[in-house]
Amino acid sequence: MLHLSQQLLSLLACILSVVTAAPHEHADFDAAAALRSHGFQVDQYTDLAPLANTSSNRACEIACNALEHHYGADSVDRPDEAAYTSFVGAYWSALQSDVHPYCIFKPSAPEAVSVLVLLSRLTQCPFAVKSGGHAAFAGASSIEGGITVSFQNLSGVALSADKKVAAVQPGNTWGSVYSALQKDDVAVIGGRVENIGVGGLTTGGGISFFSSLYGLACDNVVAYDVVGAQGKIMPASTTENPDLYWALRGGGNNFGIVVSFHLETIPLPGGQMWGGSLLYEESSFDAMCKAFSATVDSIASNDHKAGLWLAMAVQNGTKVASVEHYYAEPDGQQSPAWAPFADVPAVSDTRQNRVLFNYTAEVQASNPDGLREMYYGLSFLGSADVLIAAKDIYFEEIAALENVRGLLPVLACQAFTLPILTQMRKNGGNALGLEDALAQGRPVYVMQVAAWWERRADDAAVYGVASRILERIKAASVARGAASDYVYMNYASMFQDVIGSYGEENGARLKGVAAQYDPAGVFQRLQPGYFKLDRAPVADSGYFSH
C-alpha cells in the first residue's frame, strides 16, 4: 500500500484546488463591457480596441488619452509636465527614478482603479502602482513606457465608531496614518519609517514596533477591499473570499490592487512608547551579537512588548555597530528583556520615551532620498554563532567596495521572535511559510545587506559583493544547522525569487488562488513588476536568491 507524507498530501490538495476551484472570470470575459458597467463610454473612443498586435507605445498613448478624457487633465501627468518630473524624481531610490512611464495616472476613487485595470486589459498597456514608493529597485512601483498609478489622491484614514478598526487607503504613508490616529489614542500595526507606504509593506508582511505582541502588519488586517482582474472591488476577509485574504497576507501584488486596508487598532495613549539606540565599538561586536540573540529568547519568555534590531556598517573606514531597542509603552528601560545587554559597554545610549509618529520620522531621517539603493536579504534560524559568522563575513567582503563613491553598506538583522511566529497563525495564518520554524521552537533571524551609493557604474560591483556575502552566510547557516530558505519580501533584492522561498506547498496554494481570481494572468503579465509567483524581478541573474 502506498503511504504519502502529510506534506505531500497537503501539496496535492493545493494542486487539486487549482483544478477544481471555480474561476471568478468566464472564458468569454469582455473588458469593454466591463468598462461600460463602470460608466466608461468605450464606444466614443474610436481607437479603443484590443491592441495585442499594436506597439506598447501606441497602446499606452490610447489608454492615457482615454483616462485623461474621462477623468480630466489633472488626473494624468505627461513627460513634458512639471508634475511628471517631480513625481519621477521623488522616489526614495534613484534606481526607481530612472524609470519613465508613458504617463502617470492619479485616481481619486477606487472605481477609477477598476477602470485602469480594465483599460489595461483592453489596450494591453502595462501598469505599476505606487503606494509609498520605498522599494529599492527599478520597476517595483514604476514601469518603463506604461502607466504608473499614483495613489496620492487615495489617502483617506477613517476610524470606526468603536475605534477598533481603521480603514486606510494605499496613498498613505505610515507617518500620516499614525498622525491621524494619535488624537484618538490608538495606533495600528505598521511600519517603523515615516515615509514608507501602507500598500507594499502590508502585502509583503510588515514588521512593526509592536510585532511580538500582535504579529506582522499583514496579520492585523481585518479585511481588504481589492480591485480584481475583472475590475470588481471585492472584499477579502476570513468570511468573504478567505482564500484571497490568506494570499494577500504576504503574497504581494499578485492577486489584485488593494484600495483599502481595514486594520485592527491597538490602544496607544498619546502615541507614547519608548526606544532608541546603543552604539558599540568593534571590541564589543561579538558580545553584542550574543546579547542580541539572548534578548530575542528573553522576549519570548519574559516580555512581548520589547523588540530590537541590529545594524553593522563601515563609515569612513571605521567599523561601527548599533542596536535599536524599542518598547510598546513608555519607560521600557525597566524591561527584563534587556538584561543580556547590561554587561556590554555602549559608547552612547539614546533610549528614551518617544511618540510613535516622531520616532518614525527620526528613523526616516537616517534614510536619505535620491541615492542608488539596494536591499538584499536572507534568513536563518536563531543562532548567535551564525550571527557572529555573518558579521565576520560581512566585514571581510565589504572591503572590496572601499572605492565605491558615496557608499554606505549596512548589515542589519532582526528577528521574527517566537511570539511573532505564533501571531502569524491568527485568522487562518499568512502565506510566508514559517510554520516549521515555529514547530521547531526557533525564532527566524531576518538579515539584509542594505546599501546606498552614487554612481550607476558601481551597480554591478555592489550587487556582486552583496551576493557573495549572502552566499557565505547561507553556507554558514547550513553548516550550523540553522538554514532557512525564507526571504522577507520587503527586504528582498530584484534577484530573489521571494514566493519560491515560501516553500512548495505555499507556492502552489498561492498559484491556485491566482488561477481562481485572475485566470487571465493580468497581475502577472500586465503588472509585471515586483515579486511574481514564478520568478524573481530579474530572473536567472546568477546572483544569490535564497
Image (tube, rainbow, N blue to C red):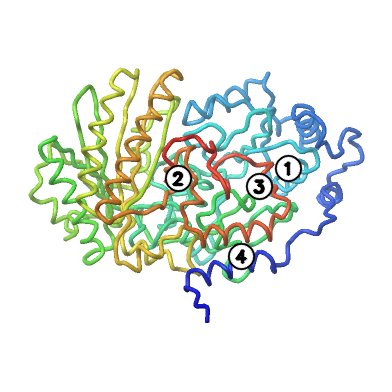
Residue 267 percent across, percent down from the top left? 39, 62
Sequence order check: which comes first, mark 2 or mark 3?
2
Is 534 placed left or right of 271 in the picture?
A: right
Residue at disc 2, secondary structure: helix
Residue 523, labelled with which disc? 3
Distance CA(mark 2)–CA(mark 4): 27 Å
Sequence order check: which comes first, mark 1 or mark 2?
1
Residue at disc 3, secondary structure: helix
| Image vertical order of residue 338 relative to residue 172, above or below | below
Q: Residue at x 20, y 41 (%)?
A: 350
Q: Residue at x 61, y 44 (%)?
A: 154
Distance CA(mark 1)–CA(mark 2): 26 Å
Sequence order check: which comes first, mark 1 or mark 4?
4
Residue 116, labelled with which disc? 1
The residue that mark 2 highlights is 490
Judged by depth in the image, the label closer to the viewer, 1 or 2, is 2
Sequence order check: which comes first, mark 1 or mark 3?
1
Residue 45 percent across, percent down from the top left? 89, 35
The crowd level at tag 4 (other Cα within 10 Å; few <14, some 14-19, many 20+) is: some
Residue at disc 1, secondary structure: helix
Q: Residue at x 70, y 47 (%)?
A: 522
Asked if the residues shown at circle 1 and circle 3 are in contact, with their CB atoms under 8 angstroms apart, the answer is no
